[in-house]
Image (cartoon, helix red, strand yellow):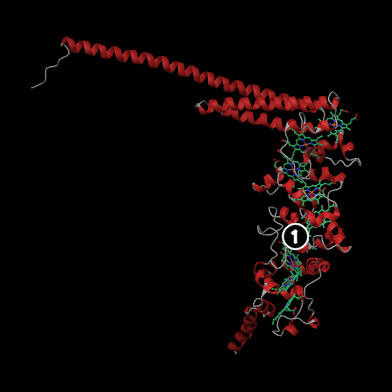
Amino acid sequence: MRLVAIGALLVPALLLAQPAKDSCVECHSVMDGPIQKPALLIKNDIHTANGLSCADCHGGDRTSDDPSVAMSKAKGFVGKPKRAAIPQLCANCHGSADFMRRYQPRQRIDQFELYKTSVHGKRLAAGDENVATCIDCHSVHDIRGVKDALSPVHPLRLPETCGRCHSDAHKMAKYGIPTDQLEHYRTSVHWAALKKGDLSAPTCASCHGNHGAKPPEVESVAAVCGSCHVLFAQLYEKSVHQPIFSAASGGGGCIVCHSNHGIQDPTTAMLVGPKAVCANCHEPGTPGAKTAAQMAQWLDGLDAALKRSSAVLTEADEDGMEVSEAQVRLGDGNENLIKARLAMHTFQPEEMHKPIEAGMAIANETLRAGQTALHEKDVRRLGLAISGFFIAITVVAIWLAIRRLEANGSGYIEPVK
Ligand code: HEC
Ligand code: HEC
Ligand code: HEC
Ligand code: HEC
Ligand code: HEC
Ligand code: HEC
Ligand code: HEC
Ligand code: HEC
Ligand code: HEC
């Protein structure tokens, strides 16, 4: 009785443990060329890791070794899906909350809905097959988890994934849009930060969205940048430029001065000199140009003063003087420089006054601390030199005295016998 009961429990368990038959993989992996490739790639696919296989996307009957049965329409076989049908194919699962949440309780299910709102999705629906579908961004047969470093949508790989089409002048020719986004992006502060491992820096999808990809509207550029640079956007929104730059003149918020793809490390060369962005609109001698010059002078002045203090403190520190307190204080000075650069985005000089003055005061105070330390070091050194001199004289005098005693013979001591 007992044995039978245990057997009844064991049989289903054994059946479950046995890998399900998969004639699709078995047959395709021994084929040649393009029909073999999927069966080889699929090992690394996240769908395989979740127990899914060929027939879950392509239909058909995986229990039959007979190709005419396995790949029969009667068994739901769809073959190679048409390009325009791919988003719907993926959405059969990815759009279903019931299905997806069995695997990942918090997985999003809106990719296809968003895709339909994007330039890509709208054009595909209108019959343009050049645009990106799900598999152009995620690949196919070796689809990886989006956080996987080898996934084509990983932040470090995504620019190249988008660039495969957007840098292809031939492919993009008929749309009349630029094909320099990747080239410029690769020179930007954002790509530099990303490469250094700062995953909070934006890739293409951070500004354009991934599934709802479209360029930010002119009105919303500041909002896109402002989703990360919050304080800058707040000041800019209240500035004299905001209504002007968002007017239908082709201008667009932050990017009028910073550009969009090739954002460089900002310096005062943006304010004055041959590359000044302000000069594009403010003629020399006008209030705008004067303000720009004033702002540059303040920022350069504070920057130079802080650097001088830092150099003096470093010298004192290397000479072994105690200046750590002043060095910490210098950090507050640099903080004020950052605040001044931020306040510049009001384009009102009054707003920069406070941080500039506070920064200058700290620069002067720490410079004095450094100079005092260096002076103290000199005094100590002089003191050391003088005492060294007197010690040397004393030693010579003693030595001379001993010599004289020896010469007189009175220094001789009779050995004890
Ligand atoms: C016994 C071998 C065999 C089995 C089993 C088999 N296939 Fe195929 N499959 C082939 C061959 C050969 C071709 C290429 C010739 C053709 O199109 O019929 C092919 C073609 C395909 C294609 C490309 C069709 C097209 O339109 O280009 C897909 C997709 C495919 N198989 C999926 C599957 C799936 C899914 C299964 C399991 C349900 C499966 N195959 C089972 C041998 C097999
Ligand atoms: C996640 C869904 C998915 C899974 C799983 C999947 N495929 Fe595909 N397969 C596709 C899509 C989408 C295409 C169309 C690719 C394209 O248009 O370039 C495709 C294309 C193909 C083609 C045509 C290739 C060509 O270049 O013409 C074959 C053959 C194929 N798949 C076989 C398989 C086999 C065999 C498996 C299992 C080892 C498999 N697929 C698993 C979605 C899938
Ligand atoms: C233009 C490129 C692009 C297209 C087209 C695209 N994706 Fe994505 N997808 C991405 C990026 C980028 C991510 C986010 C990666 C991250 O979070 O780091 C992503 C994330 C995902 C995720 C993870 C969950 C989530 O929503 O963040 C799934 C699932 C997914 N995509 C499925 C799809 C499906 C299904 C389609 C087609 C309807 C599709 N994708 C079309 C680029 C794309
Ligand atoms: C048969 C159902 C099914 C189909 C069809 C399907 N997927 Fe999936 N997909 C899943 C499941 C289940 C997972 C694993 C759970 C998860 O990670 O969200 C997954 C995971 C993913 C992931 C990783 C998500 C993450 O969070 O890292 C991506 C990307 C993805 N699929 C893209 C696609 C694309 C592109 C297609 C169409 C070519 C597709 N899937 C078709 C069921 C499916
Ligand atoms: C398979 C090729 C392909 C891939 C991959 C691709 N795109 Fe596109 N994309 C296009 C085509 C084609 C258009 C249509 C151009 C148009 O209508 O101006 C387009 C349009 C766009 C537009 C709208 C441009 C405009 O002003 O009309 C944006 C923004 C965009 N893509 C961003 C991206 C981003 C971001 C990625 C990567 C996450 C990406 N694309 C990946 C082909 C692609
Ligand atoms: C820091 C945000 C940001 C990043 C990162 C970014 N873009 Fe853009 N992109 C923009 C803005 C802003 C526009 C201009 C929108 C406007 O003028 O209305 C734009 C415009 C575009 C356009 C429309 C054509 C054009 O050049 O004006 C395409 C296509 C595009 N970007 C693709 C990409 C690709 C591909 C990447 C990654 C290599 C990328 N973008 C990275 C913000 C960004
Ligand atoms: C996804 C978040 C994010 C978005 C969106 C974003 N940035 Fe950035 N930005 C960063 C990060 C992270 C850095 C590098 C760290 C740093 O220096 O602050 C950076 C650096 C910068 C710098 C250089 C700062 C410095 O101190 O050298 C400028 C200028 C800049 N971004 C402007 C923009 C503009 C303009 C936009 C919109 C077109 C934008 N950013 C969109 C996150 C973002
Ligand atoms: C009218 C031109 C202009 C506009 C518009 C503008 N900026 Fe700037 N921005 C500058 C200049 C000039 C600097 C450089 C100041 C310096 O370092 O000398 C700068 C510096 C920066 C910095 C670097 C600050 C630092 O500490 O190094 C960031 C980040 C930044 N801007 C973000 C933004 C964002 C986000 C917007 C839109 C909300 C924006 N800017 C709009 C001119 C502009
Ligand atoms: C795209 C053109 C453009 C650029 C670039 C630009 N401005 Fe302006 N700015 C304007 C316009 C237009 C006004 C409004 C003039 C008016 O109302 O008389 C203005 C107003 C000002 C004002 C208020 C005083 C005045 O002239 O009315 C200041 C200050 C100013 N800008 C500073 C700057 C600085 C500093 C920069 C560079 C960081 C800069 N602007 C870049 C177009 C621009």
On the question of residue 303 being in view, the answer is yes
Q: Is residue 233 left or right of residue 32?
A: right
Helix or strand or loop: what does disc 1 sit on?
helix
Picture quadrant where residue 22 is located: bottom right
Position of the N terminus, as image quadrant, is: bottom right
Where is residue 277 drawn, in percent x and y? 80, 34
The residue shown at (30%, 14%) is 396
Kind of residue at badge 1: Cys
Residue furthest out toward the right: 248
| Number of on-image labels | 1
Left or right: residue 147 versus residue 226 is left
Q: Quadrant of the C terminus?
A: top left
Residue farthest along the left direction in this orientation: 417
Q: Position of residue 118 (x, y in %)?
A: 85, 57
Respond yes or no on whether mark 1 lies under 8 Å from ligand 3. yes
Image quadrant assignment for residue 364: top right
Which residue is disc 1 drawn over?
Answer: 137
**Residue at point 80%, 62% (across, down):** 133
